[in-house]
Amino acid sequence: MSVHRTASGKWRVMWREHGRQQQATFSRERDARKADRDIATRVELGDVGIRPAAGPMNMNELWADYAAGPLTLLATNTQNAYKVTWRKHLADRIGDQPVRAMDGPACAQLKVELAKAVNPPTLAKVLALLSTLLRHAVMVRQLSGHPMRGVVRVPQPKRRRVVTPPAPAAIWALADRLDAEGDSEGAMLVLLVGFAGLRPEEALGLDWRDVGKRTLNVERAVTHGEIVDVKTGRARTVELLPALEEALVSYRLDLGGVAKGPVLGRTWTDDMYRNWRRRSYEPAARAVGIKGPPYDLRHAFASLLLADHRNIVYVAGQLGHAPSLCLDTYGHVMGELAGGRKVNAAKAVKRARQQAGRAVGDLLATDTEGATG
């Protein structure tokens, strides 16, 4: 930064910002000095995402400022969740409240009111968003410190649901049933989640170029009808069990031996996936005794690897998990398998293929008898 007097008697401020030399001219020296200080603050704080203080805001204005900036850097699902949380639980309660009135007691009182109105998981989400907004208020110099610190603790609910991995034979039976109903794409989706541990959105993003003879390359996913990077941001290579590789070859031949493009034939939108889950997946899953959403099928792949005595770091890598999360999720499964004999995953899936063929035939025959009886 620099301030100097020009030949005409005016005062010029010069500075460098965004890689370019810039300048402004003022009639009075004090105006130039003030501008120099303000510019220096803006440039310095801008490097860490902090802006000079604006005029006093209310919480609606703070939300709008956050939504137009930091929120846009988050994943689309997170953006949508934050928008819904703000609209349903915070806008009417505190939207007109001045930001500087959100002190510790006000935050504590808001938590009491919310606890009476929402369940604990929702309370945790609302308080987390409130904390994020108040942190943003500090960044834009609406507050001098975070008012919730030491006063309001954001609950951290832990997942308590016990994982019950579907049996391999049940996954084959589910895929066979979908295939028999003309849903070959849905059948392949089930197999990719159940026997390769892909998240449903990763299976939807799989391209034929990612399919090898022994591995799958998982680096893309479909979210809101768009191809994006996988959830973790890091590609991974997944073991391709022989029986699944055979199913992929057969499926590929039925499609005419395609060399590239989506394995599941198209880029699915959210509505397409929801409709498939409601109209095709859920009735077929009930018929073969599988509970839970399609995502839960990937627990089968994890349990197959654990039964094959693969170490937890390998299993976590196959699923795209951190080892600590894998332990939290499958610790009880490991306990059940501890001391048991090793079960070869590839052979177990191949044997299950034979069992499932008979089981789904019985189910379809029962349905036919019921329809004609």
Image (spheres, rainbow, N blue to C red):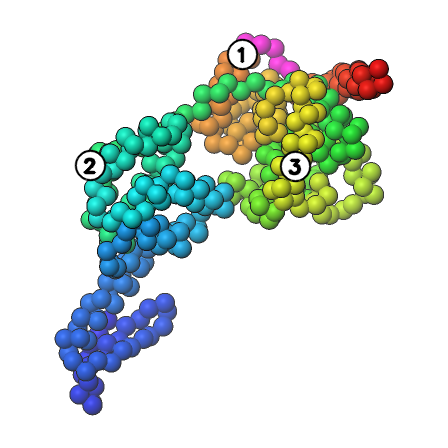
Q: Amino acid at mark 2?
A: Pro
**Location of the N terminus (image quadrant):** bottom left
**How far is mark 3 from mark 1, CA to CA?**
36 Å
Which residue does the numbered mark 1 point to in the structure image?
336
| Residue at the image point whose x is 51% and y is 24% from the top | 312
| Residue at the image point whose x is 32% and y is 29% from the top | 115
Q: Secondary structure at mark 2?
A: helix
Q: Are marks 3 and 1 in contact (CB under 8 Å)?
A: no
| Residue at the image point whose x is 51% and y is 32% from the top | 321
The answer to whether 278 appears left or right of 317 in the picture is: right
Circle on res. 105: 2
Residue 16: say if magenta.
no
Badge 3: residue crowd in 10 Å (few <14, some 14–19, many ≥20): few
The answer to whether 36 appears left or right of 316 in the picture is: left
Q: Nearer the viewer, residue 269 or 101?
A: 101
Q: Amino acid at mark 1?
A: Glu
Q: Secondary structure at mark 3?
A: helix
Q: Which residue occupies the extreme left position in the image?
A: 30
Residue extent of the magenta highlight: 339-344
Task: Return the disc, 3 or 2, that comes first in the chain's sequence.
Answer: 2
The answer to whether 122 appears left or right of 99 in the picture is: right
Circle on res. 275: 3
**How far is mark 2 from mark 1, CA to CA?**
48 Å
Q: Are marks 2 and 1 in contact (CB under 8 Å)?
A: no
Task: Return the disc, 3 or 1, that comes first in the chain's sequence.
Answer: 3
Main SS of residues in magenta:
loop
Q: Amino acid at mark 3?
A: Asn
| Residue at the image point whose x is 51% and y is 21% from the top | 330
Corner quadrant of residue 16: bottom left
